[in-house]
Image (tube, rainbow, N blue to C red):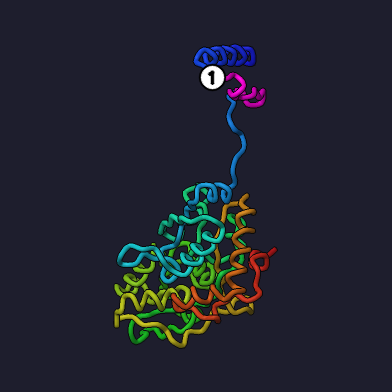
Amino acid sequence: MKSFIRLIVGLILIALLAACGANPEDVEIPAFDQNNSQGENTSELSTLEKARQEGVIHVGFANERPYAYATESGELTGLNVEIARRVFQELGIEEMVGSLSQFGSLIPGLQAGRYDVITAGMYITPERCAEVLFAEPEYSIGEALAVQAGNPLNLKSYEDIVANPEAKVGIMTGAIEHQYLTDMGIKEDQIHNVEDQPSAVEALKAGRVDAITMTAPSLREVLDTFGDDSIELVEDFTQPVINGESIRGYGSAAFRKGDEDFVEAYNEVLAQLKESGEILEIYEQFGFTKDELPGEVTTAQLCGK
């Protein structure tokens, strides 16, 4: 019945156009698709195809120096910001719309479609690999600890926090440090979660925690930014050892499940940046060195595949 109605409408349209002087052979009438009675286009572009077509990509960044942050003029920059911007340019995506977010909101935001990609201080772990797709590692870094001036509890390692059940340590919500601390045997009531880096520093200054921990570049950057003599970096901090292995984190950009073509394209450009040495030029802008290069470690290894 709907096919008959469409035929009648089409014939009427041709008659009207002919009356107006149009050539009926130049008029394109949509073909009827019985699997799509509304005549809609059912083909869907992938995230990468859509971004290339529109020239825009929406990226969620953790608000964490030196990975991603806003300058005083409001410009978005940071290690992962500049790496991502460079990769997307090579992929033909000129405009990157970046949003700074709390770390714990990144994966939910990606899955909800608020972002096309997420990055910045995002370590590749088996647990996260179950939720998102990771590109190959962009950097590799260790941990660091900051305490009140003089280090009153003499905390120089995670083991020292384990040995002192009264000691409290601050971390950002959703950060990998939570897993490290609990794996080391630190109790949940010793761990104080905060929203971001400034909140961690304020908690330490106010005495709500005895130490704060995060990646070494992040902690150095945030302490330099605050420039507060009442807190200090533990220079002789001992890197955590879990299950006989020294902990070293590997981070990269993450994508939604199903965006394998995007991950593959991202990896191809990332490999070129590593091979050309351009990624080291980006590193140097944010205090990173060749020591932070991920080497031969792969995402498949880090995901436990």
Residue 194 appears in view: no
Which quarter shows the C terminus? bottom right
Image height check: is 207 above or below 261? below
The local secondary structure at tag 1 comes to: loop
In the rendering, at what x and y percent does residue 281 appear? 50, 76
Q: Residue at x 62, y 58 (%)?
A: 265
In the rendering, at what x and y percent does residue 45 appear? 59, 43
Q: In terms of depth relative to the viewer, which is nearer, 259 or 153?
A: 259
Q: In terms of depth relative to the viewer, which is nearer, 198 or 178?
A: 198
Residue, disc 1 = 22
Which quarter of the figure has residue 275? bottom right
Task: Report the amino acid beneath label 1.
Answer: Ala
Image height check: is 278 above or below 13? below
Residue furthest out toward the right: 305
Q: Residue at x 64, y 79 (%)?
A: 244
Residue 32 in the magenta stretch? The answer is yes
Main secondary structure along the magenta-highlighted residues: loop
Which quarter of the figure has residue 243? bottom right
Residue 73 in the magenta stretch? The answer is no
Residue furthest out toward the front: 21
Q: Residue at x 65, y 73 (%)?
A: 297
In the rendering, at what x and y percent does residue 219 appear? 42, 76
Q: Which residues are magenta?
A: 23-37
Which quarter shows the N terminus? top right
In the rendering, at what x and y percent does residue 84 appear? 51, 63
